[in-house]
Image (cartoon, grey):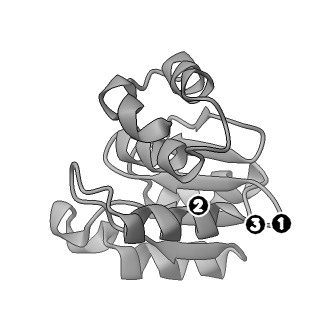
Amino acid sequence: MDIRQLTDSYAVTPQITPADVAAIKAAGFVRVICNRPDAENPAELQAARMRQHVEAAGMEFVENPISPGNFGPDIVNTQAQAMRAAGPVLAYCASGNRSSHAWALALAGQLPADKLIETAARCGYNLEAIRPRLG
């Protein structure tokens, strides 16, 4: 597992597995956001199965699947709502890229575009393609 901390309250990672859940809980996360569509995963890694493991560990699970390039208003609004938690949030997709894009788009207009882009870049994610949408 490769958790990359964008802020104190939001981190992203590539696909998690059931074996990762205990470490996610131990790291202090209270909510997990799944940004990966089920069609990209085998049955044992699909959202319903991951939800069972995450909730059994006492964390919340939010499903907000993002097809590559599909960052419409519903996706962004759902991500923004899911990011509001009483503790740290971990979002995952195939590589963490979609989860970092969704984070930045959810904060567009609240933080300067340069700040969002620089923060993601420090974690290895390039947001330049969405700069016009970041305000």
Q: Secondary structure at mark 3?
A: loop
Outermost left residue = 39
Callout 2 touching callout 3 (CB < 8 Å): no
Per the rendering, the mark at residue 22 is: none
Q: Amino acid at mark 3?
A: Ala
Local packing at callout 1 (Cα closer than 10 Å; few below 14, some 14-19, many 20+) is few
User: Could you tell me which residue is drawn at 52 percent across and 54 percent down?
Assistant: 91
Name the spot of residue 37 as percent of width and height, x first: 26, 66
Closest to the observer: 36 or 134?
134
Q: Earlier in the sequence, mark 2 or mark 1?
A: 2
Callout 2 touching callout 1 (CB < 8 Å): no
Q: Amino acid at mark 1?
A: Ala
Per the rendering, the mark at residue 86 is: 1
Vertical placement of 2 versus 106: above or below? above
Q: Indicate the quadrant where residue 70 lies.
A: bottom left
Callout 1 touching callout 3 (CB < 8 Å): yes
Closest to the observer: 80 or 29?
80
Q: Which residue is mark 2?
A: 21
Q: Earlier in the sequence, mark 2 or mark 3?
A: 2
Per the rendering, the mark at residue 85 is: 3
Q: Secondary structure at mark 2?
A: helix
User: Could you tell me which residue is drawn at 64 percent across and 60 percent down?
Assistant: 83
Q: Amino acid at mark 2?
A: Val
Q: Is residue 10 left or right of residue 121?
A: right
Q: CA distance from mark 1 to mark 3?
A: 4 Å
Name the spot of residue 92 as percent of width and height, x first: 45, 52
Name the spot of residue 72 as percent of width and height, x first: 32, 62
Q: CA distance from mark 2 to mark 3?
A: 18 Å
